Image (cartoon, rainbow, N blue to C red):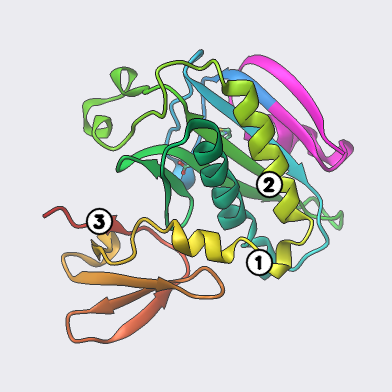
Amino acid sequence: MLEIKRFGEVESTNDLLKQQGENLPEGTVFVAESQTLGRGRKGRKFYSPKGLGLYFSILLKPEISGEEALLLTPMAAVAVAESIEAIYGVDARIKWVNDVFVDEKKVAGILTEAVTKGNKQTFFVTGIGINIQNPTALMPPKLRNIAGGIAESCEKKEELLRKVLDTFFYYYKNLTKKEYLDSYREKSFLIGKEIFIPDRGEEVYTAVGIDDSFGLIIENKSGERETLFCGEVSVKLT
Ligand code: BTN
């Protein structure tokens, strides 16, 4: 089922797989040495320099509803966090909804995109970028204190790729059973922290839990709760 195709420098493995995915089987994985236009959520750049990280995209053709497709990203986050822990022996946390943190720094991000052409079956591309070594020297100053790395060298890169793919497809076989939900909750980086929602201004909330649909349950200072299903939250620095 797994077919790994390797590339040197590409613009973005997600874009390449979205272009070619229609004629390729599920389980095709595009791995690149580097990306010149690596993308994250909200059109942000994902720095993908040669020799420092693992950048790949997975082609998925499940028969699922749009709502079920929203499970792909949190599931991938669990696969990435568990694999980083298994290979490097560090504690990996998931920042709702799609980022993985080690030592309070972002080391990985996930971007799932859907492609629908005419009346053809929709397919999905889940892209995963992992900073194995710290790439911050190459980044603009304002991003340097957000991103981090996991190790001093990339020698375990192949082992990490295999582990992420094995774990990803283990959970994917029973995607809707959500076997990965407990792990997502345990590894949740935000729970108990004070956060704010940049789109809403200064109001401070506490992140109190993750619901069964991977929504983030937050509580305001008056004790009122609500659940967020998408968007961006930031940790309040004390
Ligand atoms: C994020 O941080 O919001 C998600 C980052 C996803 C990056 C990966 S790297 C492989 C694939 N190709 C891309 O252009 N993006 C994803």
- Is 4 positioned to the left or the right of 49 in the image? right
Relative to the observer, which residue lies in front, 160 or 238? Answer: 160
Q: What's the magenta region?
A: 1-30
Which comes sooner in the sequence, label 3 or label 2?
Answer: 2
Q: Is residue 50 magenta?
A: no
Tell me the crowding category of disc 2: few under 14, some 14 to 19, or many 20 or more residues within 10 angstroms, Cα based.
many
Query: Can residue 39 be seen at all in this image of the molecule?
Result: yes
Secondary element under disc 1, as helix, strand or loop, is loop
Q: Nearer the viewer, mark 1 or mark 3?
A: 1
Give the quadrant of residue 125: top right
Q: Which residue corresponds to mark 1?
A: 178
Q: Which mark is residue 235?
A: 3
Q: Tags 1 and 2 in contact by the CB under 8 Å rule?
A: no
Q: Amino acid at mark 2?
A: Phe
Which comes sooner in the sequence, label 1 or label 3?
Answer: 1
Q: Nearer the viewer, mark 3 or mark 2?
A: 2
